[in-house]
Amino acid sequence: MKRFHVHVSVDDLDTNIAFYSKLFGQAPSKQQADYAKWMLDDPRINFAISKRGHTVGLNHFGMQVDTAEELAELKALADAASQGQSIDQSNATCCYAKSEKHWTLDPQGLAWEHYFTMADAVEFGDDHAPDSTACCIPVMSNAEEKAAGNCCVPKQATATKSSCC
């Protein structure tokens, strides 16, 4: 079964945890000093927030799956939607979890992540840009970022041209 995923970057984690806990009627299912996640069953959504250096607002959308077979199905759909331009991240550590995943961008440049979580992790992640503490969100079709030499959605307008993917 699939679960819709939304990740929002916030400026004040504690204020946002209080707000979303009241909005969803429950405390986060996972909480760290820089991250919180609610695994809601109605509606079935994985809603995450973090204070990790990205611009405040929508970080990315995604779909979390329960099996490797479901991930393969979503990979085929992502490849079809992006003309084969999705980017794989095997054994990724991100958002305090070890996952198999792939990324694509929609025509507006919004990042979509499809992933299968294999285990919890003790750190936020190591699949990030060298100058950032945030997980790498690959850039494929964003011509401006690609031309600038970036392979990841930058954490801010002043991101360096370092490669990370």
Image (cartoon, rainbow, N blue to C red):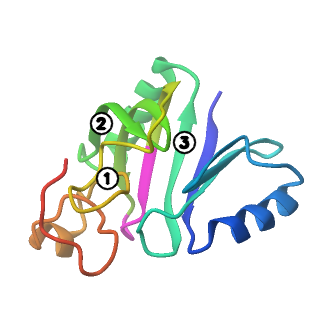
Q: Secondary structure at mark 2?
A: strand
Q: Are marks 1 and 3 in contact (CB under 8 Å)?
A: no
User: Label for residue 63?
Assistant: 3
- Amino acid tagged 3: Met
Q: Earlier in the sequence, mark 3 or mark 2?
A: 3
Judging depth in this view, the residue of 47 and 132 nearest the camera is 132
Judging depth in this view, the residue of 68 and 164 nearest the camera is 164
Q: Position of residue 25 (x, y in %)?
A: 89, 54
Q: Dot 3, how many residues are within 10 Å of its Cα: few (below 14), some (14-19), or many (20+)?
A: some
Reading the image, the residue beneath label 2 is 89
Span of residues in magenta: 107-113
Residue 80, quarter of picture? top left
Q: Residue at x 36, y 67 (%)?
A: 109
- Amino acid tagged 2: Gln
Judging depth in this view, the residue of 13 and 56 nearest the camera is 13
Question: Can residue 97 be found in the magenta stretch?
Answer: no
Q: Position of residue 50 (x, y in %)?
A: 54, 59
- Amino acid tagged 1: Cys
Judging depth in this view, the residue of 65 and 17 nearest the camera is 17
Residue 100, quarter of picture? top left
Quick check: 96 above or below 68?
Answer: below
How far apart marks 3 and 2 lie (CA) works out to 15 Å
Disc 1 versus disc 3: nearer the observer:
1
User: Label for residue 136?
Assistant: 1
Q: Residue at x 45, y 40 (%)?
A: 114
- Image quarter in which the N terminus is found: top right
Q: Residue at x 57, y 53 (%)?
A: 35
Question: Can residue 108 be found in the magenta stretch?
Answer: yes
Q: Dot 1, how many residues are within 10 Å of its Cα: few (below 14), some (14-19), or many (20+)?
A: many
Q: Dot 2, how many residues are within 10 Å of its Cα: few (below 14), some (14-19), or many (20+)?
A: some
